[in-house]
Image (cartoon, rainbow, N blue to C red):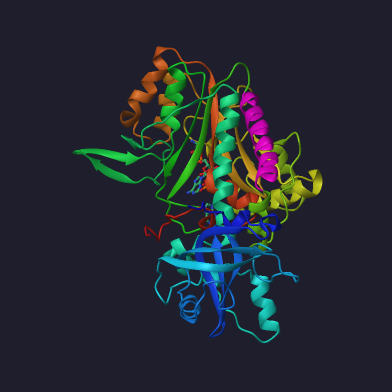
């Protein structure tokens, strides 16, 4: 009995060896009654298989059968690896399999809603074809998402979700070595965790409840319970109204919370080390995946520094002002101003990754610690990639009376978070943390322009299926 060789592992080293592969029928190319080609694809890798009656044990009937296979059907093929004289066009592997046997393991429909070959094309290829008079089909985003199972078979999508897996893995590995404990907090909670209206409400056995908008309250309570440093990777639910390129109604939060000894810069130090390690590791571990993404969606590698730039909000406002952009010095930056500041930072500091800290208190959530020297500002920060936010973080208020007062003054139902506020009455250490949007990190690292591309089955204000 033979073992299966992954298509991606077929190299010239396998020359003249007999191999068994399993993959999908990517394309069939009938040549004559006696000969057909079939390209077999496995996880984004493709190899050309030749079926000819000149080969051992291959009948005309088999050639006909292979030529008639529906695309995306799953096949097992046994054959001998050969290395043709000329380079093979249109496959990732530079060898050919001379097929002896081929079995159809499972048949796909004869007509599919998405052709994976079409879905894998870059805009540049489609344009180039148009120039030379050919019209190639363009698969639009909604069709991709409606038939996502087919769409995610493209090499770029295979790359995107393998990169996403690495972002989570590196996050976990880094924090474990820094002494953080992984926790799992409830997603069914009594009140809103971030305030505001973007919350999914539900009925919890007769009691009003919410889907957690973040693990904010419970990750802080874990610090009150003496874990010192914690992190969580889990779902976050936001009933966002607006349909934007960067908001989902369900996303994956990478959350961190830690005791602080002296200053909230200790939290920013973790952000800095974590993300520099993350970007270095992604560039090292995911070369193939990054290339696959870049072939369909070309992008420039992210510019970042070994030590991450930190600017205060006031400095940012000043840079914008100097460039002729007036913003409220005590308000939030809108999307446009954030982008503009990203450009200015790139020009001045040659980096596309930076931390903006000391935000105005008025634009931050109720649990944010004001600055000790000026209560108009806060011990908080946002982090940007290519001018878009990927992280919010801050030192937290750990004095219960003040926390209750802050929540109340921002119109939050204090009763619904009373157990959270009480946690600080039993003695709470100074602490802070941050939350990262996983889909945003991948979207911005690869400059993909739309968060739906980095969510396997995206939930946005208009979509809850598939
Ligand atoms: P946070 O995570 O802090 O909530 P976010 O990235 O989810 O940040 P918001 O807080 O929702 O973004 O908004 C940040 C800024 O982006 C807001 O000040 C707002 O001006 C702008 N913004 C939000 N939604 C939209 C939208 N649909 N169109 C244009 N700008 C928007
Ligand atoms: P914030 O609300 O800024 O902070 O969320 C943290 C990060 O989550 C991502 N994010 C989103 N991603 C996709 N779709 C959305 N609708 C969406 N909203 C937010 C962003 C954002 O930076 N509790 C605080 C974090 C903390 O202080 O620890 C919080 O939730 O990348």
**Can the viewer see residue 260 in this picture?**
yes
Quick one: 70 or 159, which is closer to the camera?
70
Q: Please say whether residue 271 is one of the residues in the magenta stretch.
A: yes
Residue sitting at x 51%, y 57%: 452
Quick one: 382 or 361, which is closer to the camera?
382
Specify the segment rendered in magenta.
264-286
Left or right: 21, with 108 as reference point: right
Is residue 358 positioned above or below 32 on the image? above
Q: Quadrant of residue 425?
A: top left
Q: Residue furthest top?
A: 427
Q: Position of residue 215 (x, y in %)?
A: 43, 34
Quick one: 464 or 41, which is closer to the camera?
41
Is residue 418 positioned above or below 465 on the image? above
Left or right: 348, with 218 as reference point: right
> Could you tell me how many numbered marks the image carries?
0
Quadrant of the rendering where the C terminus is positioned: bottom left
**Can the viewer see residue 245 in this picture?**
no
Q: Please say whether residue 148 is one of the residues in the magenta stretch.
A: no
């Amino acid at each position: 009995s033979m073992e299966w060789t992954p298509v991606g592992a077929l190299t010239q080293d396998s020359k003249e060896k007999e191999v068994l592969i399993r993959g999908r029928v990517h394309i069939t190319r009938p040549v004559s009654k006696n000969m057909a080609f079939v390209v077999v694809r496995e996880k984004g890798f493709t190899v050309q298989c030749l079926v000819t009656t000149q080969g051992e044990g291959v009948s005309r009937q088999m050639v006909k059968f292979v030529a008639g296979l529906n695309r995306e059907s799953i096949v097992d093929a046994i054959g001998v690896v050969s290395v043709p004289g000329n380079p093979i066009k249109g496959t990732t592997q530079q060898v050919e399999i001379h097929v002896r046997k081929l079995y159809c393991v499972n048949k796909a429909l004869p007509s599919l809603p998405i052709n994976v070959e079409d879905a894998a094309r870059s805009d540049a290829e489609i344009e180039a074809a148009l120039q030379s008079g050919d019209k190639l089909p363009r698969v639009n985003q909604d069709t991709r998402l409606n038939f996502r199972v087919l769409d995610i078979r493209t090499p770029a999508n295979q790359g995107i979700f393998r990169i996403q897996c690495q972002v989570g893995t590196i996050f976990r590995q880094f924090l474990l070595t820094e002494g953080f404990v992984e926790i799992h907090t409830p997603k069914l909670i009594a009140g809103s965790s971030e305030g505001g209206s973007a919350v999914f409400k539900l009925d919890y056995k007769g009691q009003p409840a919410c889907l957690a908008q973040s693990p904010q309250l419970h990750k802080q309570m874990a610090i009150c319970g003496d874990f010192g440093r914690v992190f969580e990777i889990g779902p976050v639910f936001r009933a966002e109204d607006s349909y934007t390129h960067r908001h989902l109604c369900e996303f994956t939060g990478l959350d961190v919370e830690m005791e602080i000894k002296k200053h909230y810069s200790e939290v920013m130090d973790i952000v800095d080390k974590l993300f520099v390690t993350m970007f270095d590791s992604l560039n090292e571990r995911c070369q193939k995946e990054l290339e696959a993404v870049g072939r369909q969606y070309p992008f420039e590698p992210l510019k970042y520094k070994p030590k991450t730039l930190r600017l205060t909000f006031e400095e940012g406002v000043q840079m914008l002002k100097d460039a002729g952009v007036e913003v409220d010095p005590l308000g939030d930056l809108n999307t446009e101003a954030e982008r503009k500041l990203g450009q200015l930072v790139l020009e001045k500091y040659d980096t596309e990754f930076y931390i903006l800290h000391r935000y105005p208190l008025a634009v931050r959530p109720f649990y944010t610690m004001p600055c000790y020297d000026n209560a108009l500002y806060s011990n908080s920060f946002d982090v940007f990639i290519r001018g878009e936010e990927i992280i919010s973080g801050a030192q937290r208020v750990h004095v219960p009376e003040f926390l209750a007062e802050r929540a109340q003054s921002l119109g939050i139902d204090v009763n619904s978070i009373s157990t959270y506020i009480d946690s600080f009455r039993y003695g709470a250490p100074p602490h802070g943390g941050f939350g990262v949007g996983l889909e945003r990190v991948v979207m911005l690292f690869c400059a993909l322009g739309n968060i739906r591309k980095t969510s396997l089955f995206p939930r946005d204000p208009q979509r809850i299926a598939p």
